[in-house]
Amino acid sequence: MQGGSTPAYAQKKGDPVDLISTPQKSDAKSLIDYKSIKDVLVNDNLDQVVKERKRRKKRASVLRTKRLISTYDFPSRENFWPFFSEYWLVKSVQKLKWNFTKPDYGLDSSFKKMLEKIGFLEKQFKVMLLDTNEITHVALPGSDQSYIILLSLPFIRTMDLTKLEISLLLFEDFIRARMGYFENYATSKELQKLFGQNYYQKKLPKSLFQDLLAKYDKIVFSDGFTFQQQFEVTTEVAKLLKGNEKFVLAYRRLIGKIDNLVKRDKSYKNYNQLYPSPELQLNWLNGGGVAPRR
Amino acid sequence: MEGLELKIVNNQAFQYLPRVLSVMLLLTLIIVSGDVDARSGNREKTVGVLYYRLMFGHLHSRPTPYSESLTTIACGQPMRLYERKNSPKMSNQSRDWARVKVGTRQGYVLQKTLAPTKPNCFQDQYPAFFKSFKLDLSELYYWGRLYDQYIRGKSQVF
């Protein structure tokens, strides 16, 4: 430090005052040995600690982002259809009237036994009885291992079906679901592209699910299945039942009962449009009739 | 004597003993603790914690799918399972139901809808997708009712 009462840096009044009275450079150099401090820091591995902390922070942030991105996964086809079919059921509860106290027909065990006898093992099924004849019977898109089948209680009651006949009706729908007609009809190109993909920072098309709900309604209530599809299903069921005379006869009896019902009961006049047609099915089963053109 | 004390202190296994004991005590308390049954006034014994494994469901007031719903439950919901003694008076259907406590409510859920570990729920697998459906209360209620109303089965390998 220089001698005298006034420091060198406070020469004029009004000048900014440096509160840290720094010694002159030459003095500082002599007082602080920067090299030794650097050596100490290097020996302390502090720079390594800082680097490691930065690395850890970066890793945590990458993980967080990855986790955030994964929340935007779109379900796979297998996971999507069972979910959406149930969503449609929930949305259509007033129309479908499935929320009521049901009698126990023992359908779970009879249909299970039928599947096992025909050789379809490890297949889960959910049957929903409806208190309406707006829908008679239909299998909704599900996964390869799990099936949702709707069945009208008034429909099976009117025809006085046996447990075996009901199981065969469920089996026909089960085969129709396996053939994927409903699913193919409902799947749009847009939806197909989304299965199993990630849509982080992208927006799902607003109308995607509304359109899909409308397609479900259309196929279930008005469009139904084509002659070609019906022919394929009937011949496939007949092929699978072959060898079990009891099943074959019961299936013919079932189709005959449906044919009679739709011919005499006006409330089922829509049936032929959805499942064309029991009369033709009987022909196909008896080996007659011609397969519809594709 | 001093040497012996030092040996014990240095032993790593003994350092964790109080913590292990307290965790075991807590677990025992959870398992053994019971609640008072509102109807009979008897203390009910809890036998474990289980998780609901379907998308949605209902906690029922009685062991039938058509009884009143006490609350809607979602997949992954933990619940305390009460010990339930089967009596000859019980119907076969009633035996399929477990008596549980969800939050503050006690009721019944189907036994086969419970899992011993937290299940891999659809809602957790695809949270953003699931959220985009913006389900309202009545939809949640009906989704739960679906599982009460299904006739379910599975064909099996003999």
Image (cartoon, grey):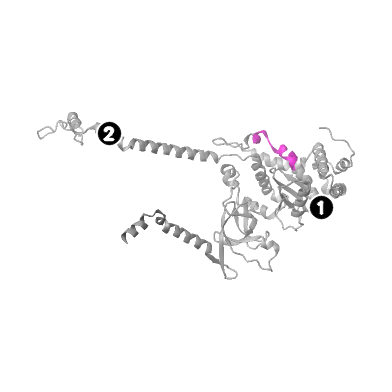
- The residue drawn where x is 75% and y is 58% is A104
Q: Residue at x 77, y 43 (%)?
A: A175
Dot 1 amino acid type: Leu
Query: Which callout, 2 or 1, points to the residue nearer the camera?
Result: 2
Residue closest to the far left:
A4
Image location of residue B34, percent across then percent down = 54, 65
Residue at which label 1 appears = A164
Magenta residue span: A177-192
User: In the figure, is residue B72 to the left or right of A128?
Assistant: left
Say what secondary structure mark 2 lies in: helix
Residue A82 or A158: which is nearer the viewer? A82
Q: How many residues crowd around disc 1 within 10 Å: few (fewer than 14), some, or many (20 or more)?
A: some
Q: Which residue is mark 2?
A: A39
User: Across the whole image, how many numbered discs are drawn on residues?
Assistant: 2
Instruction: Determine the residue positioned at 36% across, 38% down.
Output: A49
User: From the image, which quarter does the C terminus of chain A lie in?
Assistant: top right
Magenta span has A190? yes
**In the figure, A239 relative to A1: above or below?**
below
On the image, the x and y values in percent for residue B121 come to: 59, 48
Left or right: where A202 falls relative to A284: left
Label 2 neighbour load within 10 Å: few <14, some 14-19, many 20+: few
Can see residue B2? yes
Disc 1 element:
helix
Residue A9 at x, y percent in the picture: 17, 31
Chain ID of residue with mark 1: A
